[in-house]
Image: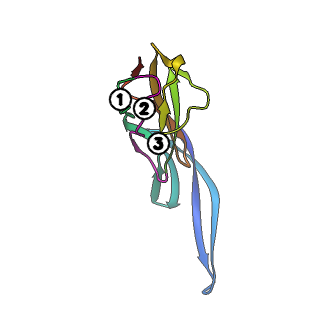
Amino acid sequence: MKKVLVFQETLATDGVNASRMISAGSIADVEDGRAAYLVGMDDAVYMNPPANTTPPVLDKTTVAVGGVISCTTGVWTGNAPITYARQWLRDGANIAGATGASYTAVAGDSTHSITCRVTATNSIGNASAVSSNACAVT
């Protein structure tokens, strides 16, 4: 069980203007790791970091030098909006500067395995997943 700080939101109005005050509340237990934001005495909204449900996929499993490989983002859950960043990998190591949705294989990739890591980020956190398949460069 994880501990999270719960905040209480208080809304007030003078008949013309509305004001909003957020004050620190108590520490709450959250069994599934989600952070809770208390919006009323009996109401909590759960805020979820990204979680991968279907890994990214490469569009090719073999490519010649000069060939282009594309990587999907996969499928993610979590509070919107979620942004995605890619990092291409050669035998599991980052390829410098290779962060686009597609990658063009170079001579140095020959006989190596190319994969793609997608990192999903929202206001609560981030998570990464590596493509479920690899591409061999011939």
Tell me the CA gap for discs 2 and 1: 6 Å
Q: Is mark 2 in CB contact (under 8 Å) with mark 1?
A: yes
Front-lying residue, 88 or 37: 88
Q: Which residue is drawn at 44% across and 32% down?
A: 68
Q: What residue did someone put label 2 on?
A: 69
Q: Callout 1, which amino acid?
A: Lys
Place of residue 104 in the rendered image (x, y in percent of width and height, measured from the top left):
49, 30
Q: Foreground residue, 90 or 65?
A: 65
Q: Which residue is drawn at 40% across and 42% down?
A: 76
Left or right: 63 in relation to 88: left
Q: Is residue 41 above or below residue 126?
A: below
Magenta segment:
64-81
Q: Main secondary structure of the magenta part?
A: loop
The residue beneath circle 1 is: 60
Q: Upstream in the sequence, badge 2 or badge 1?
A: 1
Is residue 27 covered in magenta?
A: no
